Image (spheres, rainbow, N blue to C red):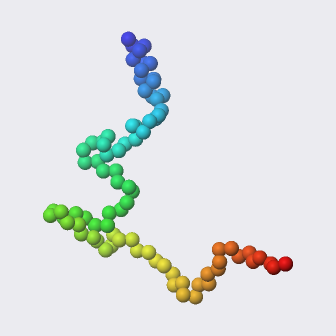
Amino acid sequence: MALGLILGIGRAFRRKRTSSLDILTSKRSPRGFYKGKNCKPTGFHTRKGGYVVVPEKLPNYVVPDLTDFKVYKFNLFQIRSS
């Protein structure tokens, strides 16, 4: 009996993940667990079911001025006429 127990413990440590059942999802986790998609919240929920967006949490994209930017074609090679 003791040998079987030791062998069972050894098998459990050597076992590798062979299926997707071992991956933690919201279905296979404690109640209240929310995995999400790695996104940052932009606000908070109110008590009455609404959602308030906080401007400080919104992403701020800094784009340079491109008025004098010279755009080239994708293919710069010119075909010589023979």
- Left or right: residue 39 versus residue 76 is left
- Left or right: residue 3 versus residue 67 is left
Give the x, y percent position of residue 56.
33, 73
Would you place residue 52 above or below residue 21 in this image? Answer: below
| Residue under the image location 64 percent in, 80 percent down | 72
Would you place residue 17 above or below residue 62 in this image? Answer: above
Would you place residue 25 above or below residue 41 in this image? Answer: above
| Residue under the image location 32 percent in, 40 percent down | 28
Q: Quadrant of the N terminus?
A: top left
| Residue under the image location 48 percent in, 79 percent down | 63
The quadrant where residue 81 appears: bottom right
**Residue farthest toward the left in the current orientation of the protein:** 48
> Depth check: 78 or 50 in front?
78
- Left or right: residue 80 versus residue 2 is right
**Residue farthest toward the front in the current orientation of the protein:** 82
Query: How many marks can you see?
Result: 0
Give the x, y percent position of residue 14.
48, 28
The quadrant where residue 31 appears: top left
Would you place residue 45 above or below residue 9 in this image? Answer: below
Q: Quadrant of the C terminus?
A: bottom right
**Residue farthest toward the bottom in the current orientation of the protein:** 68
